[in-house]
Image (cartoon, rainbow, N blue to C red):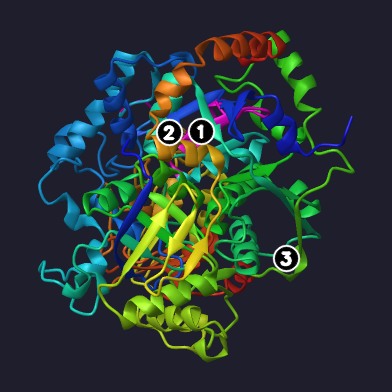
Amino acid sequence: MAPKTLFEKIWNRHVVTERHGQELLYIDRHLCHDGSFTAFDRLRERGLRVRRPDQTFMTPDHYTPTHSASLDDVPDPRAKELAEAVRVNAQEFGVTAFPWGDRRQGIAHVVGPEQGITLPGLTMVCGDSHTSTHGALGCIAFGIGSSEVSHVLATQCLWQKRPRTMRITIDGTLGFGVTAKDVILAIIRKISAFGGTGYAIEYAGSAIRGMSMEGRLTICNMTIEAGSRFGMVAPDEKTFAYIDDRPFAPKNEKWDAALAYWKTLPSDDDAAFDEEVALDAGDIAPMVTWGNSPHDAIEITERLPDPETESNAERRAAMVSAYDYMDLKPGMAASDIKPDRVFIGACTNARIEDLRSAAAVARGRKAVIPAMVVPGSGLVKAQAEAEGLDKVFTDAGFEWRLAGCSMCVGMNGDMLKPGERSASTSNRNFRGRQGPGSRTHLVSPAMAAAAAVTGAFTDVRKLMEEA
Amino acid sequence: MEAFRTHAGVAVPIDIPNCDTDQIVPARFLRHGRSEEGYARFLFHDLRFHEDGSEKEDFIFNDARYKGSSVLVADINWGCGSSRENATYVLVANGIRAVIAPSFGDIHYNNCTKHGILPVCLSEEDCRTLRRQLRESPGAEIALCLDTQTVTGPDQQNYSFEIDPFDKHRLLNGVDEIGLTLGHDDDISKFEKAHRNAHSWLG
């Protein structure tokens, strides 16, 4: 048999039929959220049912308030309607939901792996671009548009053009204070915000093997910021240990059967990829973005780049424009940028390990600018509280909130004011992403906490050495 | 879905590399229904309007000479970022029938093809040429023919483009994709049964 990649092994097992060069791909599991209401409305209009309600899961996240779990405390009537729509759609179509007030509720990309809904070998979709996150468990998971959500609800399938494959190998050991967030920002800096377009990316190498599941989830999460819909990591013992005993994971004989199958999934040694990229883990430092594309990432010890050194005229003009929007100057030190506010959360960095890492920096220090911590799910919140992390944060003057997407996208009202600058653990520094006129700098949870306690972007390694 | 066969119309250049879907439609408007009055104003909202709602004069989409544009010529990585299909709805609401760019965000590209909008990939150089011509001759038209896979620029220069045969078929015929797939119901059921047998652990 010809050697195959992890991606090919899973994809090939899900092709129902082919037509005009596209394949009808069977989708094993479908995650929905509070922004999926349009797709359900479309089904209702056409009198269609959900083909596999037993494989469809829903959790409100985008519009969810993080200051209160009570609808009575939400002033916005439309937000109430959308929260209610989750309950109504789940009931009417028979899908499993984790609505407001359910302790399992949270960001879809945190809840999926946490509940054991996300498993190796699956095809999974969600009407959200950060669905690439789930590939960290060794499955094909990708973000889709709302029409495609309706299509999957109605047919459990999607017409797809098979992407090309890329392997990004990161060998070596990550330096002290360097996290998965820094790794993915370094990758995007190297391959650009569109280097992955049309590809499915598999992350490999000793640095990835040595990384926790949380770290792998962070890397796969931001794969879409490099243009690729699919980020993947081959399942290994760490993956299996993470999944074991989660509520929706297979149990007993089914677990044994699953495990035997999952072990066959890693790419064959001599499998060929359409594109290969390599980075040395030892070369990666804590990162911070300065502009309006995740590609605009620099090391914390660097100075902001000079547009004059950019040879492409459009790119040069975009840099000048980004400097104007961000109110920054070329050549200034990254550590001279002073954020107004800190956001620790989002599907990129709101898992327990992220909160531990931020708390380690916040412990015994005081925030000098407003800072908020938004756990990725009710269960992450409970776990953090059991470990006393909430107390560490609140003692340091950070706000401790309820689970949701929150200030990553500002749809629930958690926003920056126009002109405000954030240190944010989210995934996008686009203009207006955190509210009209907002200025976002992407960093790791530890770097965000360091910014909170110093009032400037600070090399977190210095604070960690002090501790 | 509205079919796309040929189209000719005024084209507007959008000189923004990596123009993400947050720029095409900011997140705070996603809660609004497509049928609401004023929906068309959400396209490029924060690039187009000041906080008080007045138009920003320097944004090209507000230039009266490009009024009624139905084709956008954009830059690299158009429509990257969020999967929001609203970025397609606002194009439809403004009568946009085609977007020409050197590359697209994959999800936005697919979303366009579900709404009768033709996404066309031309080289960076060709897109640069077209945008320059449109800046030099505001109100100039671009013509597109999906059947022959051709774009005709304001100077009558022809450019050919590639498109996936499946997307072409659906766009040319305005195919309802759900309807098409439901026609494969037997195939899906057969597959599903074999798949579940092979992977009992799927539950």
- Residue drawn at the location 70% of the way across and 65% of the way down: A176
Looking at the rendered image, the disc whose residue lies closer to the viewer, 1 or 3, is 1
Question: Helix or strand or loop: what does disc 2 sit on?
Answer: helix
Q: CA distance from mark 1 to mark 3?
A: 34 Å
| Number of numbered tags placed on the structure image | 3
Q: Position of residue B80 (x, y in %)?
A: 46, 57
Quadrant of res A65: top left
User: On the picture, is A286 further left or further right than A445?
Assistant: right
- Residue drawn at the location 18% of the way across and 68% of the way down: B49
Q: Chain of mark 2?
A: A
Name which residue type carries label 3.
Gly
Crowdedness near tag 2: few (<14), some (14–19) or many (≥20) residues, C-alpha within 10 Å:
many
The numbered mark, 3 or 2, whose residue comes first in the sequence reads 2
Q: Which residue is mark 3?
A: A175
Pointers 1 and 2 in contact (CB under 8 A)? Answer: yes
Q: Position of residue A285 (x, y in %)?
A: 66, 70
Q: Quadrant of the N terminus of chain A?
A: top right
User: On the picture, is A61 further left or further right than B202?
Assistant: left
Name which residue type carries label 2.
Glu
- Residue drawn at the location 48% of the way across and 44% of the way down: A388
Q: Quadrant of the C terminus of chain A?
A: bottom right
Q: Which residue is mark 1?
A: A125
Crowdedness near tag 3: few (<14), some (14–19) or many (≥20) residues, C-alpha within 10 Å:
some
- Which mark is drawn over residue A148? 2
Do marks 1 and 2 both belong to one polypeptide chain? yes
Quadrant of res B1: top left
Q: Position of residue A450 (x, y in %)?
A: 50, 67
The numbered mark, 1 or 2, whose residue comes first in the sequence reads 1
Closer to the camera in the image, B19 or A304: B19
Q: Is residue A426 magenta?
A: no
